[in-house]
Amino acid sequence: ADEFPEMGVLAPPSIGGTAVVLALDVSDAEAVFARAVRAGAEIRQPLAEMFWGDLHGQLDDPFGHRWNIGQHLRDVPHAEIVAAAAQAFGWDVRLAAGRTGLRVRALSGARGFGKQVRRPGARRRRLLAGAMVRL
């Protein structure tokens, strides 16, 4: 939707980016993606089959809002998802002792959560508790 500055509603470009990603799980990701592009959305990540079993892509709409479009294709065993994520992002992933979640250590130069979780003064190697829970 258009901005409405009088009510404090601004589009992401006016505030320097977006703080959220809107995620849609749909039955036909290719059709939804194509329709969004025809309506003026810009592709950030083309549709591709992902290691967690979904067809997934990311768009920015004409107002600057970011959208994840996903379609479930297949069930993937939890252990396979964890191993693929560890390889893709350079993580050391282990079950958290006595918990249902995982502990994820982002190794130097790792991709993924790095910039999102780094706090001022944080060391390059850090422990993220519960970054991936019940994938």
Image (cartoon, helix red, strand yellow):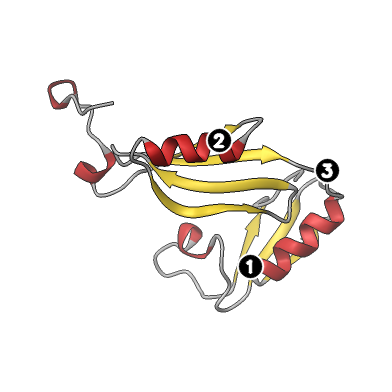
Where residue 61 appears, x then y in whole percent? 36, 39
Left or right: residue 92 compared with residue 31: right
Position of the C terminus, as image quadrant, is: top right
Depth-wise, is mark 1 or mark 2 nearer the camera? Answer: 2
Q: Can residue 63 be seen in this view?
A: yes
| C-alpha span from label 1 to label 3 | 21 Å
Mark 3 and mark 2 lie on one chain; the one further toward the N terminus is: 2
Residue in the picture at 63% in, 67% down: 89
Q: Mark 2 points at which residue?
A: 31
**Mark 3 and mark 1 in contact (Cβ < 8 Å)?**
no
Left or right: residue 120 compared with residue 11: right
Give the numbered dot on residue 89: 1
Q: Mark 3 points at which residue?
A: 75
User: What is the three-letter code of the residue carrying label 1?
Assistant: Phe
**Mark 2 and mark 3 in contact (Cβ < 8 Å)?**
no
Residue in the picture at 25% in, 36% down: 11
Nearer to the camera, 133 or 74: 74
| C-alpha span from label 3 to label 2 | 22 Å
